[in-house]
Image (cartoon, rainbow, N blue to C red):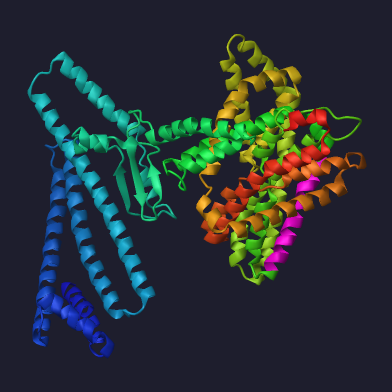
Amino acid sequence: MKATGFISLWMLVSLPCGQLANPAEHEDVVKHAIKLHRGKGAVIAQRKQWVLESCRKLSGLLRQKNVVLNKLKNAIRAVEKDAGLSDEEKLFQVHTFEIFQKELNESENSVFQAIHGLQRALQGDYKDVVNMKESSRQRLEALREAAIKEEMEYVELLAAEKHQVEALKNMQHQNKSLSMLDEILEDVRKAADRLEEEIEEHAFDDNKSVRGVNFEAVLRVEEDEANSKRNASKREVEDDLGLSMLIDSQNNQYILTKPRDSTIPRADHHFIKDIVTIGMLSLPCGWLCTTIGLPTMFGYIICGVLLGPSGLNSIKSIVQVETLGEFGVFFTLFLVGLEFSPERLRKVWKISLQGPCYMTVLMIAFGLLWGHLLQIRPTQSVFISTCLSLSSTPLVSRFLAGSVRGDKEGDIDYSSVLLGMLVMQDVQLGLFIAVMPTLIQAGASTYSSVFKEILRILILIGQILFSLAAVFLICLVIKTYLIGPYYRKLHAESKGNKEILILGITAFIFLMLTITELLDVSMELGCFLAGALISSQGHMVSEEIMSCIEPIRDFLAIIFFASIGLHVFPTFVIYELTVLLFLTLSVVIMKFVLAVLVLSLILPKTSQYIKWIVSAGLAQVSEFSFVLGSRARRAGIISREVYLLILSVTTLSLLLAPALWRAAIMKCVPRPERRSST
């Protein structure tokens, strides 16, 4: 068996040299390899001698390794049969031997991996960049796996060392009598060890073999420079995990989300500093916009631009800031639903359902037409058109803040129609996110599988419709049997203490949000329905809850609009200002015209005048296009350039929205109602 292994090794080493000796273009590579190993002017005899000596040394090491492995096996059997050792001591010694066995086996594997790598490199074409890239990728994967194995071995050695120390302590305790305090501390130590074992999650071991998990090299950066000024030890810096940051090879930055030791409280100081900075800078920015007559939300967006990657780049926890900003959307839509009573919803539900669907279909049709003329892939055209068909619910909600009015002479209130259509668009957003994986597969599919993809999309639409029916059935049950007693109980418990009322309403919002999320409908719809259900209890109830929730909504809305500013890049807008202005105006005009056309068909004749205001409210692009665009870019549906164009067009359309809204209000709304609408 050993002779066979020796012959195989000899063939493995000598085969590449025999294959490369004949081709003239590889002759220099062979000469360079000989120079590296034997020096310049090496002759063929010296080269053969070096190969023979190397093979003898390697064969000797392998024989020695097999001898050591046999000795380790005998030692393990001897330990297991030794009756004088305790179970803990046996476990410790056997574990130590097994670690050494792994070290020997891994070292042998590393040798043969290196030989295979050399063979692959010598057989390759040095002019073929793709082949060298693949070889480099394989070496990188091998290094990552080796690093993981070495890390695991180091952890095992630490555990073995801990067992050894505990065994020595037990021996010392058996040889001397302990005081009462020492016995108490020993019991506390054992309880602490049990606690660590109970709460510790072996996330690394549990997930390393999961499908889709990749090993990557990362940099760990200690942010706090004050540690060096205080001459902190290396161990103290390593323990300060709350301030460390990991950076991978793609320049993605990560922070600690869950420490191994959950008994020590930690705080993300980056996130705290980011929120404090946004809060302080939002005041002057919002104040400035109020002075010049712009909505304060643009001041908050400017705040995000100044602090984001295109400005001072001082925001470290961008993902965390955006996540907190999403709660601003949730509470905004809750207050919108609080003003949007079920009675108003019943009056406009047909318009709210039909309008967004017709507009989306028309936008996709125009997108496919322009995509065919410009030779753009159909999947990309569908995605861009759907993105641009969505409008910003939080922005329009700010426009309509305080503009709730009763219907006059049977006319339909424009705010009811506008909010109903926006909520339906949020439902479409959830549907589109669900369909996106199919859209990705459709981009790579052949025409033979088109029917399967269409069938899959129809099934998804059916699932969404079923989920919507289930959501509204649940809302009917809650409105009939639960919401009244629930609010009365909250109101009775919160006399003199608004904390219970706020907590109870927030819990109800999150309950509805969770229900719609579990049913694969957008979370925003759940927040809106929560407000609409509570508004069914009467105007006094709505006013009381609004006074409690509005301050929370205002603060979280500041974070949300600032997070939008983090994705605004003024330099890119300036470089491509002409193109972006043309695209933005085209999108705004197209959405306005399509909305007017659709509303002309579905609105009653007595309410045709509101189509101009509703169309003006819909003539911008939703901030959720940032989310959809990022997902599509990662999936390869759109390119980087298209993604930046979508971001810029969205931003410019949001900036133009107030001007268009005011123009529509001035033209269509009677003078006494303008103050509350603007």
* Res. 663 image quadrant: top right
Given residues 311 and 258, the one toward you in this image is: 311
Q: Residue furthest front?
A: 292
Q: Position of residue 603 (x, y in %)?
A: 87, 43
Residue 356 inside the magenta-drawn segment: yes
**Residue 455 image position (x, y, % from top left):** 70, 60
Residue 507 is situated, as x and y percent measured from the top left of the image, at 59, 26
Q: Residue at x 74, y 36 (%)?
A: 472
Name the residue nearer the viewer: 79 or 23.
Answer: 23
Residue 633: image x %, image y %? 54, 57
| Apparent side of residue 504 relative to residue 468 in the rendered image (left or right) | left
| Secondary structure predominantly adopted by residues drawn in magenta | helix
Residue furthest to the top in view is 496
Does the magenta segment cover residue 454?
no
Q: Which residues are magenta?
A: 350-372
Q: Residue at x 54, y 52 (%)?
A: 630
Which sits in the foreground, 156 or 254? 254
Vertical arrangement, residue 294 with respect to residue 54, above or below = above
Instruction: Please identify the quadrant where the C terminus is shown.
Output: top right
Q: Is residue 468 visible?
A: no
In the displayed structure, 48 sits above or below 232; it is below
State which quadrant residue 657 falls in. Answer: top right
Q: Is residue 392 above or below residue 38?
A: above
Name the image quarter holding the N terminus. Answer: bottom left
Mark yes or no: residue 608 visible: yes
Which residue: 90% across, 42% down? Answer: 604
